[in-house]
Amino acid sequence: MDLIIPTELNISATSTKTWNTPNQEVIVLEEKPIEVNLLEQKIVSLLKYEKWRQGNLIQTELQRLPLTWYGVYEFNLLLEKIGYQEITISADYKYLNTPTEAGQMITYEAKKTTS
C-alpha cells in the first residue's frame, strides 16, 4: 500500500492538469482545496473535470474529494494494532529505502498471520 503525505496545503492554490485522449478530445482536471484541517489531518478538494472536443466544451463533472492522511509512524502503529507483522517501509519504490523527507512516495508491505 502506498502512503502519500500532502506537502502543499495552500487553500488558495488551484492546480490544473490536462490529458489528450486517442479520439482527439482533451480532459482538463482542475483541483481546488476548499477545506484544510491540519489538526485532524484532513483536506477537502473540489475537482472539476471538463471534456473538450475541437475547442468546444462537451461535458463537465464536479466531485467533492475528502482525504485523510496518516503519518509514517502512525500508519505503522495502525497496521500493528490490527494484526499485521513483518512490516516494511520503502521510499520511492526502492525496497527498504528509508523515507527521509516529505513528498516521497512511501510504500508499506506487511503480512498478517492467520490463526
Image (cartoon, rainbow, N blue to C red):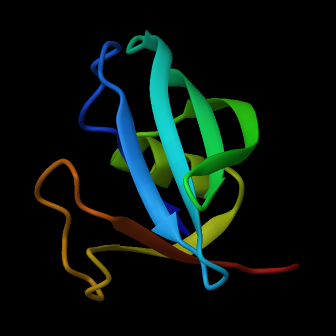
Q: Quadrant of residue 71?
A: top left
In front of the other: 112 or 11? 11
x and y percent of residue 36 in the render? 44, 13
Q: Residue placed farthest to the left in the image?
A: 100
Residue 64 in sight from this viewpoint: yes
58 over 35 or under it: above or below = below
Which is nearer the eye, 30 or 60?
60
Q: Quadrant of the N terminus?
A: bottom right
Q: Is residue 4 something that shows in the picture?
A: no
Is residue 42 or residue 12 the one in the foreground?
A: 12
Q: Position of residue 31 (x, y in %)?
A: 48, 34
The percent position of residue 95, horizontal first and vertical second, equals: 30, 88
Residue visible at 38% across and 15% down?
38
Q: Is residue 87 above or below residue 95?
A: above
Q: Please tell me whether residue 54 is drawn above or below residue 5 in the rendered image.
A: below
Q: What residue sits 30% from the left and 22% below the top?
A: 13
Residue 105 located left or right of residue 24:
left
Q: Residue at x 84, y 80 (%)?
A: 114
The spot of residue 111 in percent (x, y) is: 63, 80
Task: Determine whether, in the image, residue 100 is placed left or right of residue 55.
Answer: left
For the C terminus, which image quadrant?
Answer: bottom right
Q: Quadrant of residue 83?
A: bottom right
Residue found at the very far right of the displayed protein = 115
